[in-house]
Image: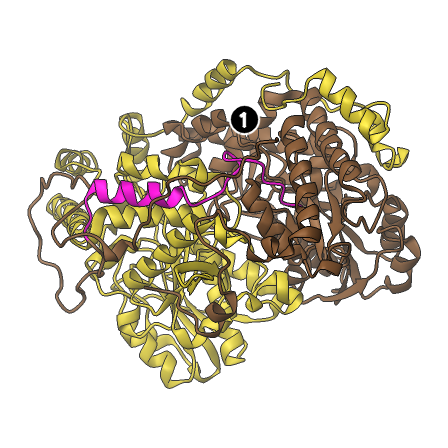
Amino acid sequence: MTEFPGATGLVLNESLLWEKGRRGRCGFSLPRRDVERRPAPEALTGAGPDFPDLSEVDVVRHYIRLSTWNFSVDTGMYPLGSCTMKYNPKTNERQAGHPGLAGAHPLLPADLCQGALELMAALECLLAEITGLDAVTLQPGAGAHGELAGMLIFHAYHRHQGRARSKIIVPDTAHGTNPASAALCGYTSVGIASNADGILSPEAVAAVMDDQTSGIMLTNPNTLGLFEENIKAIAAIVHAKGGLVYCDGANMNAVLGMAHMGNMGVDVLHLNLHKTFSTPHGGGGPGAGPVCVAKHLEPFLPVPRVRLADNRYVLSEDFPLSIGKLQAFWGNMANLVRAYSYILTLGAEDLKQVSQLAVLNARYIKERLKGTYHLPYDRPCMHECVFSDSLQQAHKVTTLDIAKRLMDYGFHPPTIYFPLVVPGAIMIEPTETESKEDLDLFIESMKAIAVEARETPDRLHQAPTRAKRRRLDETAAARKPCLTG
Amino acid sequence: MRYLPHTPEDIAEMLDAVGVESLDGLFASIPADCRRSAPMVLPHPLTEWELNAHIDRLAGRMAIGPAYKVFIGAGSYEHFIPASVGFLTSRSEFVTAYTPYQPEISQGTLQAIFEYQTLAARLLGMEVANASMYDGASALAEALLMAARITRRSKVAVSRAIHPLYRRVVDTYLKPTGLEVREIPFGLNGTTDLGALDDPAELAAVAVQSPNFFGCIEDVGAVSGRAHAAGGLCVAAFSEPLAFGLFKNPGSQGADIACGEGQSLGIPRSFGGPGLGMFASRMQYVRNMPGRLVGETKDKEGRRGFVLTLSTREQHIRREKATSNICTNNSLCALTAAVYMASLGGSGLRELARLNFDKAEHLKSRLRAAGISLPFGAATFNEFVAAFPDGFDATYRRLIAKGIVAGLPLESYYPELKNHYLLCVTETMGKDDLDALAKEVTS
């Protein structure tokens, strides 16, 4: 009998912070007072916040208990499609936490921060080489921030050409952030549908591309895990009408060392360092979303840019066509250090192997689960595969039930109900850091759940039963929002 | 490679199962003309120990304490961070989890963020705070976009005493939207000159920062009075939230949106990022807010639990009609700030704020005694502007050689403030450091 990872154990309850504590406790070693008290202007001072007073032990137990209610990559397999939940190496934490970097002020004079500037310059070169594009900004703080940077570059480019444009083409397989980012630049999204093979056809793009359209925003490989095989022809159509090609690089983990974004005709690409380059997701950030561009768009990159002059790195503002600044400072440096450490640790051959094994793992799951679950696009997938619940619906079991039941088996569910082109989508991205044994256990769990769906569907409707909480009432949460305690 | 678990036998078995002969064969769907023509050229891979040495070398070329005394704040502050904060926030269960879309197995993150929202709202005196934004500057830009959505007006007024780098981010965000940004000058005492604000009737928002970029405490109550009288919103920005341990918070002075940088609350400076964009507003505007929100609810058995909520505002549901394109935020930094605020508690936060104020006042009095001009008369928290005599730049360089960075020169941000420096003093500076600085700048 297979032993699945899911189990129950002793998990402790824990109240809210302000339900604990006693007035007069403090969990902080207050620094010695070596100056006298000075009068503060009374008209301007307030009472200070109503925070609970807790001891260090109160605080430590509180958060340790909370932490045990979370599932994480370090706990087990987390095959969230489109999120690339790979292992986050621990040495990267040591490097990012180095006091010389973690303790550095961002506005130090250039001569006092050469180490950080050298690292940024080197990372820009590495990312340019990996993507096959020419110039890089490290400033955006997340993938969506990178998308915004990209759309601002589109906007600035067309204005510089003397003609602002009003529309942007966004395929139905796009991430939801894509149209939202474009809207921030005033662009109207023009949706186009993928073809029967799940990819874009040049004809669909040609039908809508005109001289009012700033370009196209696509993801390659796309959110069905399929490579957009017509991208070169699509780029040619867009370029012929004076438009630009934006590639959402969220799925870069599939094509490291294989694909060349410049050869594909991509003008702008954002990377998610928290996906492809192993920086942790942190329960929802911080990430980092560097943007890589082809040579002709370099003048539009955000400022300041790191430059080497007389053997000395400086932050230069001297780029008059720049879109400006996206964050107060230079980017999420701690994540830049982690990604830099990851690339230096792997090198060219192992980075290529990352993508080979990420694709192998996804393809293996696709082949082994095909038939057990409906596979709407049975084509060779890249780093992720998308199933649906259509075989289980006969038993009144949905994707949501399958996802919740997976928790009881000890796995984080895949991404569900996305991409929108597949109703009831189950989007699985195992990543390269899962071993064959763990994939086999996952596959076996999914097959066992399919059997349960037929034989004991209520077990799925009731799931999860082994987590800290049963299903939560999200409707009530939204109807009467309680957002503070 | 230690992160890749596959043995050659595993690979062979898996290739066999998928019916492909080689790893390269998995990529048959990539057309030849989309491929690389040559392998990537990257540095030879480093062992863990070589990587340590490499980063040690780079980090060794940075000016940090205790070798350097850096009297710069300007949106990034040195504060003591208890070991317990770093210990707790490096728990894998927090660090390596995704956005809590599956609440049953993410209650740790969800409760922690709900608690963060509550502490942030209490600190700022606001009714609701979101789960965080990228940084203080982008939070301000989003606040102005939100004010424009609420009021359906297309002009905003922004004080020139707001952090200059924040204002540049605002320009970047607002430029393609067609919203017009008007600047309000600052007066002789270093605070915003509201008298110079004309035509407030057209404004979606009036934005100030307090403490402002010069460290001066603004009269946010007067700003909200002016904004409200003209039907606009008051946006109160900040870069040093520790100040609200001592000074009045934005909510108590009528601010509609409070937004700013939370790095000060236990987050390392890390050469500028990641920081913590704090964002709070009145409850009546919650459906116009950008960013994630965590709300309380019950599970199937009636037990208290937490979920992401009001997501109909967000990009993954609303797509181009979303209130913002933001999806991930700086959740782990919000957790860090919550652990830090919980560790300090109400009493600790007040005393720590007091100490920052007193130390800055100590340096101010020492500089005044040494004949240095402090041109702005308004009250300050832990930062202030000093006007040094002509030729001070040589002294500044000499002090760097002695390991002292005597503030931030302001001339590149405000050409009229030649020889003016922004000095910051937190609890990390001892009285000896302050006295030494006062002595050195005049010798």
> Which residue range is magenta in the image?
A53-81
Task: Say left or right for B381 vs A134.
Answer: left
Please tell me which residue is depicted at 37% across the width and 59% down the height of the picture. B117
Q: Which class describes the residues within 10 Å of circle 1: few (<14), some (14-19), or many (20+)?
A: many
Q: Residue furthest front?
A: A455
Which chain did the image draw in yellow? Answer: B
Q: How is the image coloured?
A: by chain
Residue B280 in picture, x, y percent from top left: 39, 65
Q: Could you tell me which quadrant the N terminus of chain A lies in?
A: top right
Query: Percent x, y for residue A265?
Result: 82, 43
Asked if residue A56 is among those painted magenta in the image, a careful observer would answer: yes
Residue at the spot 68% in from the left edge and 17% down from the top edge:
B7
**On what subunit does the disc labeled 1 rest?**
A
Which three-letter amino acid code belongs to the residue tagged 1? Ser
Q: The chain shown in brown is which?
A: A
Is residue A386 left or right of A65 when viewed as pictured? right
Residue B379, by quadrant, is bottom left
Q: Is residue B204 visible?
A: yes
What is the number of callouts on the image?
1
Residue at label 1? A341
